[in-house]
Amino acid sequence: MRFVTTLAVALLAGTALLPTAQ
């Protein structure tokens, strides 16, 4: 289940950084 947790964290970080990049 480690992969699922890493994927969720990466997704949250991506959605959090997307508006900042713009």
Image (cartoon, helix red, strand yellow):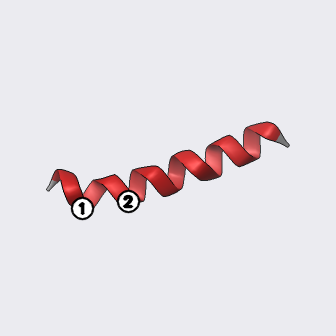
Q: Say what amino acid the circle numbered 1 marks.
A: Pro
**At numbered mark 1, what does the secondary structure look like: helix, strand or loop?**
helix
Contact (CB < 8 A) between labels 2 and 1? yes
Residue type, mark 2 in image: Ala
Q: Position of residue 9 (x, y in %)?
A: 59, 50
Tell me which residue sits at (53%, 45%) in the image: 10
Name the residue at 41% across, 50% down.
Answer: 14
Residue extending furthest left? Answer: 22
For the point 40% across and 59% down, which residue is it?
15
Q: Quadrant of the N terminus?
A: top right
Q: Residue at x 63, y 52 (%)?
A: 8
Q: Which disc is residue 4 wearing? A: none
Quarter that holds the C terminus: bottom left
Separation (CA) of disc 2 from disc 1: 7 Å
| Left or right of residue 4, residue 19 in this image | left
In this view, the residue farthest toward the top is: 3
> x%, y% of residue 7?
63, 44
**Horizontal and vertical percent position of residue 2:** 80, 39
Check disc 2: other Cα within 10 Å, few if <14, some if 14-19, many if 20+.
few
Disc 2: which residue: 16
Q: Residues within 10 Å of mark 1 (few under 14, many from 20)?
A: few
Eyeballing the image, is 14 above or below 16?
Answer: above
Which residue position is annotated with label 1? 19
Q: Secondary structure at mark 2?
A: helix
Relative height, residue 11 to residue 2 (above, below): below
